Image: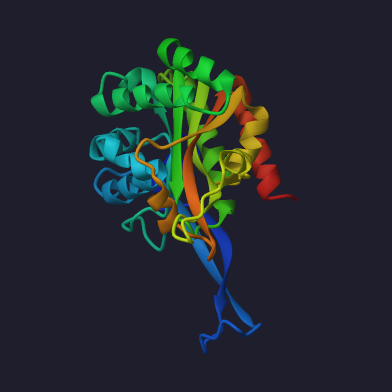
Amino acid sequence: MGKKRAREADGQSTPAVASADKMDHDGSSDDEDFDIVNVDFEWFNFDTEIDFHGVKGLLRQLFDVDAQLFDMSGLTDVVLEQNTIGSTVKVDSKANDAYAFLTALNLREHREKKPVADLISYLSSKAGQSNNETLAATVPKILAENHVGLVLGERLINMPPEISPPMYSMLVDELEAAVEDKEPYDFTHYLVVSKTYNEVQSILDDGARKNKKAKEEAPMFYFHPEDEILKKHAIATGSFPFTKDDESVADSKRAFQEMGVKSMGYMTLIEAAKFPAAVRAVADYMNPQ
């Protein structure tokens, strides 16, 4: 399907170069001198023989503490079955585990499979728990009645966000090629699943707790900066609490000495006709000319 399949047939992949800061060789964090490490990231189609464990681990990261609610092995199998829709990102060799992945699951085609049926039920329920009334009213109806592409993507925490635009651009190209080939990917909507977080008062510090008003006003941060751009093209977006979350989990993710990190799920609902423009906006934002 398009360029990515042709690249792999020729044993080639598209490299992307990212720079990362590294401490100087003496290991001192006080030094102001840094080396630049250039890393070539390569894009591949999903491979059922190679990618199971890497993609499963990233799916667990995406769904955080609620991953235990799902058959993650079964969900991973569904992702890998759609091997011409979406990408993995790797370093050095196709045989390595994925550092990132992105796909659009065809919910209409897979909704009878239990891992997907459970996920549809979960997202419908969580939309009702979100902080957006439009999302709560719209998502369950659209999931039940429309042809939805469920966009799932995750990357290792230290991966540069600049890998996101080419992943999304290739996804759009592959979906368009699939529709031209009469494959069932002519979606009406895309539902992007991601995560956000708030910094919260630790329950370990003198038993201190913020009052309800302070919690409600805590600023929201995006794990994936592209979500902030996709939001501008969306019908509705919203965060939702994880079912298995508790305050001790936030303490285990303390980003600063005083604060914990409370992760939440996040949904972005976009009309299919607006999705290509949203993807172009992500590329313009992250890779300005």
> Measured along the vertical axis of the image, is residue 37 above or below residue 219?
below
Residue drawn at 57 percent across, 43 percent down: 211
Residue 226 is situated, as x and y percent measured from the top left of the image, at: 60, 43
Q: Nearer the viewer, residue 214 or 61?
A: 214
Q: What is the tally of numbered marks visible in this picture?
A: 0
Residue 255 is situated, as x and y percent measured from the top left of the image, at: 52, 60
Q: Is residue 105 visible?
A: yes
Asked which quadrant contains residue 92, the reply is: bottom left
Q: Nearer the viewer, residue 161 or 260?
A: 260
Asked which quadrant contains residue 182, the reply is: top left
Residue drawn at 39 percent across, 35 percent down: 84
Q: In the orientation shown, which residue stands out farthest toward the bottom?
A: 26
Q: Nearer the viewer, residue 223 or 233?
A: 223
Q: Is residue 262 left or right of residue 105?
A: right
> Measured along the vertical axis of the image, is residue 53 above or below residue 67?
below
Q: Is residue 6 visible?
A: no
Residue drawn at 45 percent across, 16 percent down: 140
Residue 53 is situated, as x and y percent measured from the top left of the image, at: 27, 50
Residue drawn at 44 percent across, 28 percent down: 150
Residue 257 is situated, as x and y percent measured from the top left of the image, at: 53, 66
Q: Is residue 288 left or right of residue 205?
A: right
Which color mode does the image show? rainbow
Q: Nearer the viewer, residue 51 or 214?
A: 214
Q: In the orientation shown, which residue stands out farthest toward the top?
A: 145
